[in-house]
Each structure stands twice: as C-alpha cells, then as structure tokens.
Amino acid sequence: MDCPNSKFIFQNSKLYLVPTPVGNLDDMTFRGVEVLKSVDLILAEDTRTSRVLMQHYGITTPLQSYHIFNEHKVVDGLVEKLMSGMSIAVVTDAGTPGISDPGFLLVREAVRKGVEVECLPGATAFVPALIDSGLPCDRFVFEGFLPHKKGRQTAIQRLAEESRTMIIYESPFRLVKLLEQLMETIGEERQVSVSREISKLHAETARGTLREVHDHFAAKEVKGEIVVILAGKEE
C-alpha cells in the first residue's frame, strides 16, 4: 500500500516504535506500513499475532520475538545491531509500544548509546476510551495495570484521593473484582466508564456509577481488552 503524498524518509541506525491497531486492521497508518516495510528487522511481542497484520499489508520484513520475558536478555544485542547500522521497528500485539507493553527498556538503552529513536503517532487504547467516557479529559492520570496482589489495595486507596480522571487497564477476568474493590474503598456512587473491544465489531462502553457498571459486567461473560476510566474525587 502506497500513499501518493508520502514524504517518508527512511534512516538506517534508527529505532522506530510503530503503533498497531487495537482492533480494526484499517486503523494502521500509511506511514506505519512504510516503516515496517523499510526496516531491517521487526521486533514483535507475539510473532503469530503480528504476522496476521504483516500479511494483511504485504510486509515481508523478518520478525523477531521481543516480549517482557526476554527483553532484558536481548536488549544489549539489539542495541549493538542498531549501532552497527541496522534499522529496527518495535510493534506490540495492539497499540503503542511502551504503553503497558515492551519497548521502554530498549528505548532507554538506545538513547543512552546515542541511537536515534522515533515513536510514530497512532493507535493506543486509552485515548478513545477516555474521550468516549464523557468524563473530564483535560487532566488525567494513567495508571496502567494495577498490582495483581502485593500493593494492590494500597494502590486503590491512593486512587481514592486522586482528583484527576484515572485510566486503568485490566484483564477481563479481573474486571468485576476490580470494580468490587473500587466500591469497597471509594463507594458505589463514583462515576466510571468501562470500554472493551475498542474499534472491533463487538466494541462496548458501559457508563454509570461503580455499582451500575459492576452489575452490568457481573451479569455477563467479559471478553476483550479492558480500559477503565474512573472519575476523580470531587475537590
């Protein structure tokens, strides 16, 4: 796929972070496709997932697995490749690398070694979820995934006093439990919005009080990527 007005200038010895669609494959940008076609290597969180996207856009660049379980082991070798003149792109299963996904560690080391780094603009799950929520989005705090066990209750207690709109990522298997924990600490009347399957066929956003949204999801099987937008404490 070529964009007739493209002004993409490819550079060797550069690390690109390329956002990928959070749902609909058509959300991929022209420039993102051009970068993925042009680099020497693509680092993918899950090569099986990324291969679907690559095949869809005719991208034949070699893929290498790069995820939270191996990023510490491979980072030095990847930086060496960049410094030797290779160009590398990082993609995750969905969204922008580094946002609750692998990417930060490699970026940090590349910057330390003087390698040029560029993150392309593109898809990330929390922005449409925040806008769709109807809650204030002029001031917000991104919390990502809360601790699963140790420190979880402390984190929730801290959020209870936060006045800005809060963005939380959660597994569909723990969503109902999270809403219960929030009710226990914050109360049932705090406004919340929960978005799932963003940009996919069965996309859904449920808005209301913590009690209302909890009851909605407790009565059904929850699937998909989850973004919770929690209203801040009234000042």
Image (cartoon, rainbow, N blue to C red):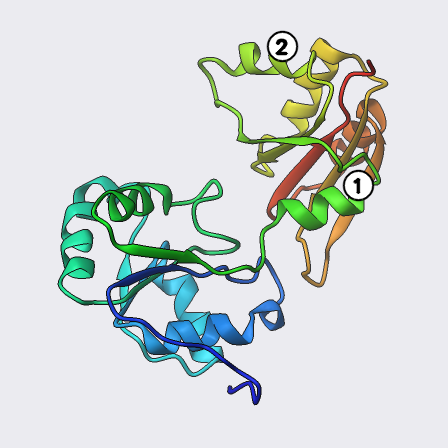
In the figure, residue 78 lies in which quadrant? Answer: bottom left
Q: Camera-side residue: 96 or 146?
A: 96
Q: Which kind of residue does numbered mark 2 sit on?
A: Gln
Distance CA(mark 2)–CA(mark 1): 22 Å
Instruction: From the image, tell me which residue sits under label 1.
Output: 133
The quadrant of the picture occupied by the C terminus is top right
Check the image and name the residue furthest to the bottom: 4
| Image spot of residue 47 (x, y percent) | 34, 62
| Image spot of residue 11 (x, y percent) | 31, 71
Say above or below: 173 vs 184. Answer: below
- The answer to whether residue 78 of the structure is visible from this angle is yes
Q: Which mark is residue 2?
A: none
With 132 as the anchor, is 172 left or right in this view?
A: left
Q: Report the residue at 43% width, 78% height from top.
A: 55
Q: Which kind of residue does numbered mark 1 sit on?
A: Ser
Q: Report the residue at 40% width, 72% height from top.
A: 35
Q: Camera-side residue: 170 or 26?
A: 26
With 183 as the anchor, is 150 left or right in this view?
A: left
Q: Secondary structure under badge 1? A: helix
| Image spot of residue 96 (x, y percent) | 50, 53
Q: Secondary structure under badge 2? A: helix
Instruction: From the image, tell me which residue sits under label 2.
Output: 157
Q: Around disc 2, counting alpha carbons within 10 Å, would you say few (fewer than 14), some (14 to 19), or many (20 or more)?
A: some
Q: Tell me which label, 2 or 1, sits earlier in the chain.
A: 1
